[in-house]
Image (tube, grey):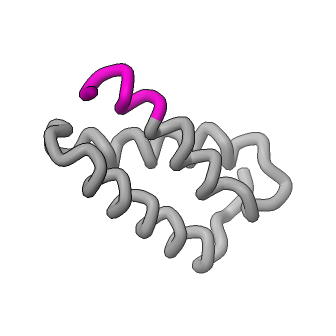
Amino acid sequence: MLRMSPHTELRLIHSKRALEHEFENAAPGEIAHEIAVESQRLLSGARFDDYIPVLVHRFAREHLLERVA
């Protein structure tokens, strides 16, 4: 599995904060869980991590919209 670069990790932190702001009513830890699950899933088949944060944000947001909104 590909190891995430520090730049990608920072972008995921920003994505988590943006989702926390958007989904204020989400259960505690739900957003962090979605980010972690999607990150691991995408990293397992990745050869580079440039687009991982964008895709993680998109998929996590879609899952949260289904459950929270």
Please give the range of residues in magenta.
62-69
Foreground residue among 51 and 68: 68
Q: Position of residue 33 (x, y in %)?
A: 35, 42
Q: Position of residue 29 (x, y in %)?
A: 22, 45
* Quadrant in which the C terminus is drawn: top left
Relative to residue 15, is residue 29 depicted above or below? above
Residue extending furthest toward the bottom: 6
Residue 58 position by quadrant: top right
Foreground residue among 18 and 37: 18
Name the side, left or right, on which 34 lies relative to 51. Answer: left
Residue 6 position by quadrant: bottom right
Residue 66 falls inside the magenta stretch: yes
Residue extending furthest toward the top: 66
Residue at 68%, 48% in the rendered image: 43
Q: Position of residue 23 (x, y in %)?
A: 25, 44
Relative to residue 35, is residue 4 depicted above or below? below
Foreground residue among 69 and 6: 69
Residue 67 falls inside the magenta stretch: yes
Relative to residue 68, is residue 2 depicted above or below? below
Residue 34 position by quadrant: top left
Foreground residue among 1 and 25: 25
Residue at 65%, 73% in the rendered image: 5
Q: Position of residue 46 (x, y in %)?
A: 79, 49
Residue at 36%, 32% in the rendered image: 64
Dominant secondary-structure state across the stretch colored magenta: helix
Name the side, left or right, on which 47 lies relative to 54. Answer: right
Q: How many marks?
A: 0
